[in-house]
Structures are given as C-alpha cells and as structure tokens.
Amino acid sequence: MINWLANPARFMRLSAKAVPWCSWTAVLVLAVGLFWSLMVAPPDYQQGDTVRIMYVHVPAAWMALSVYLFVAVASAVALVWRHPLAEVAARAAAPIGAAFTFVCLATGSLWGRPMWGTWWVWDARLTSVLILFFLYLGYIALANAFDDPSRGGRAAAVLALVGVVNLPIIKFSVDWWNTLHQPASVMRIGGPRIDISMLAPLLIMALGFTLLFAVLLMVRMRTALNERRAMALRLNAGAIPAPRPGREPVVSANTVVP
C-alpha cells in the first residue's frame, strides 16, 4: 500500500482530477457556511453578534493543530520509510498550517478585545498556540536552511516530531491551568454544549476549511513535484555531452532530450 501511494506520477494523475472537484466543493461549502454563520445563526445571549468570530476562529484553531499533526506524521514517514512523497507533503503543508495558526491568533485577539477587555493575555492556551506558530516558522526556516535539501528535510522533520509535545498542551491547557480562555465546548466527553443552531454552521465551516487545506496541499505538492522534475530535466540536459563537429549525437533510449 505504501509503495502504491509513493508513486509521484500516480499522485500527479489522481490530484489533477481531484483538485477541480475539491476546489468547487470547498467554495460551495465555505459559501454555505459563511452565509449560515453570518446571516442565519442567532447571536449569543451574552456576546451578541461578536460570537460570529467563532465561525472562523474555531475552525482555524482546529486546522492549526490538525495540519501540524499531519506535518509530524508525514515527517516520521519520510524519516523511517523514505517515502518519496512524505517530505514533499510535509513541506507543502507547513506554510498552510502557519497561515491557519495566524488566522486563529488574529481572530482570537479580535474576539478577546470585547470579551476580555484586552487583545492578548499570556495564559496557557494563547501562549501555547503562539509557540505552535513559531514551530511552523521554525520548520519552514530549517527546511530551507541547507544547501542540501535532504539535510534540511531531516532537520525539519526532527523539529516537527519534537514539537508534537505542544499539541496536547494546547488541547488540555484550559483544563490544567487557570485561564481566561473558555473550556472545550464541542470536542468534550458528554457531547457538545453548543446549540445545534450554532453547532451546524460551525461544523460546516470546519468542513470547508478542511477541503480548502486539501486543495492547497495538492496544489503545493504538484508545484513542488513539477519544480523537481524541471530541475532534473535541466541537470540531465546539461549532462549530455556536446556532439563533435560533423557527427550526430547518439541518444540512448534512457536519455532525456530537452
């Protein structure tokens, strides 16, 4: 199964068909989710319309954690099994996860100002999410810090695996420490504490963000693979010796001709 998935050519064929369908589905789901969140869902009895920030903030927070876990798993696969696509997937996912984390932090500050009276507090949840953002940036910087891409990939993969320890801290920080951030309302034992009129658009937005991630991931992976292919073609073209005057070059069946 791993060998079947490890074929870049097969991934390019499958993703070429999947990207258009996933793109239009993501646009449709996000459009429905935004309309439902902004126009149909009721305001909160305490927070009023300010609660609508939740429909972007919470899915972005979920994706920030999920994408980092994806990067860590892909990095582990790349280190252990030398999967040809695993490192490509991890490198492609990291900037997307960083963007989700930034959206989470920005919308959280916008939400915190009217609720807490301040844009930022150094409590456990906010600080650990900020650390997650720095882990993303560190992974991206480390992956591109070496002239040898394989060395950069290994170093970044180790950082991604070490950073996994921050994920349970983010998840359980509101339970372990005293914090202004509210405890879990959806993913909790006993079921969600949010009314279905608010839970439904929240889950739709989460689905839309997931589809958006899938589309961006496939597009970035396809771009990376095309760049590697173009570089390989240039290297192969430069390796072909120049023909002697008056003689035609001899091209074997395995030679790549530009």
Image: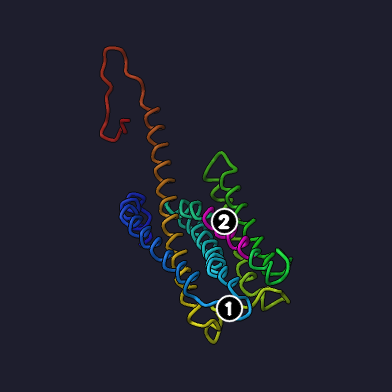
User: Badges 2 and 1: C-beta atoms under 8 Å apart?
Assistant: no
**Outermost residue, bottom direction?**
190
Q: Nearer the viewer, residue 250 or 162?
A: 162
The percent coordinates of residue 155 (x first, y second) are: 59, 50
Instruction: Name the quarter where the N terminus is drawn.
Output: bottom left
Q: What residue type is disc 1 on?
A: Asp
Q: What residue type is disc 2 on?
A: Ala
Say whether residue 196 is left or right of residue 47: left
Height in image: 146 above or below 17?
above
Please give the label number shown on residue 98: 2
Q: Name the secondary structure under disc 2.
A: helix
Q: Which residues are magenta?
A: 95-108
- In the figure, residue 121 lies in which quadrant? bottom right
Q: Name the secondary structure under disc 1.
A: loop
Q: Which residue is mark 1?
A: 44
The percent coordinates of residue 217 (x first, y second) are: 44, 55
- In the figure, residue 125 lies in which quadrant? bottom right
For disc 1, the neighbor class at 10 Å (few under 14, some 14 to 19, many from 20) is few
- In the figure, residue 114 lies in which quadrant? bottom right
Instruction: Name the quarter where the C terminus is drawn.
Output: top left
Magenta residue check for 124: no
Determine the main secondary structure of the stretch shown in magenta.
Answer: helix
Instruction: Please give the name of the residue rendered at 42% of the width and 53% of the height, measured from the top-left corner.
Output: 85
